[in-house]
């Protein structure tokens, strides 16, 4: 698939923010279905974090909730599920 996107972690009003980590990052969606996406990033994410995913021209702009993470030194592998249905998003990539 390889869809370049900007991810932005939405602030949680009742959670401690990661002070040293960027809230935005460019990454690539490596795999996606009609409901979920998989990607790697260096931003420390946790289960249930809500992310905004957006491609460069804005034709793909949606939110997803982190459903799984796997930590590696310097990288996090993330599975995120779309908050709302995204019709034909794979065609847009």
Image (cartoon, helix red, strand yellow):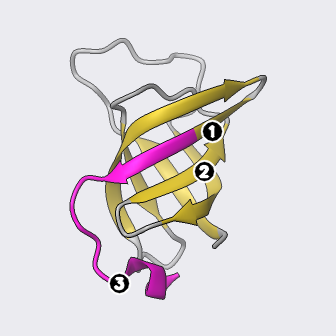
Q: What residue do we see at 22% from left, 15% from top? A: 14
Closer to the camera in the image, 26 or 66: 66
Cα distance between the residues tagged 3 and 1 = 25 Å
Cα distance between the residues tagged 1 and 2 = 6 Å
Q: Residue furthest bottom?
A: 91
Q: Residues within 10 Å of mark 3 (few under 14, many from 20)?
A: few
Taking 30 as reference, is 79 above or below it? above
Cα distance between the residues tagged 2 and 3 = 19 Å
Q: What residue do we see at 63% from left, 39% from top? A: 77
**Residue 21 occupies which quadrant of the picture?**
top right
Q: Residues within 10 Å of mark 1 (few under 14, many from 20)?
A: some
The residue indicated by pointer 3 is 88
Count numbered badges in the picture: 3
Taking 71 as reference, is 25 above or below it? below
Label disc, if present, on residue 77 of the rendered structure: 1
Specify whether 85 is left or right of 47. left
The residue indicated by pointer 2 is 39
**Residue 34 occupies which quadrant of the picture?**
bottom left
Q: Residue furthest right?
A: 73
Q: Which element type, helix, strand or loop, lies under badge 2? A: strand
Residues at circles 3 and 1 in contact by the CB criterion of under 8 Å: no
Give the x, y percent position of residue 51.
39, 45
The quadrant of the picture occupied by the N terminus is bottom right
Residues at circles 1 and 2 in contact by the CB criterion of under 8 Å: yes
Taking 45 as reference, is 26 above or below it? below
Give the magenta range. Answer: 78-93
Between discs 1 and 2, the one toward the N terminus: 2
Give the x, y percent position of residue 60.
41, 73
């Amino acid at each position: 698939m390889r869809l370049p996107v900007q991810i932005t972690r939405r602030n949680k009003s009742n959670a401690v923010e990661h002070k040293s980590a960027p809230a935005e990052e460019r990454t690539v969606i490596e795999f996606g279905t009609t409901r979920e996406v998989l990607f790697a990033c260096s931003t420390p994410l946790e289960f249930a974090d809500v992310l905004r995913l957006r491609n460069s021209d804005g034709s793909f702009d949606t939110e997803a909730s982190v459903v799984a993470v796997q930590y590696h030194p310097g990288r996090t592998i993330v599975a995120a599920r779309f908050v709302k249905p995204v019709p034909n998003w794979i065609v847009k990539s």
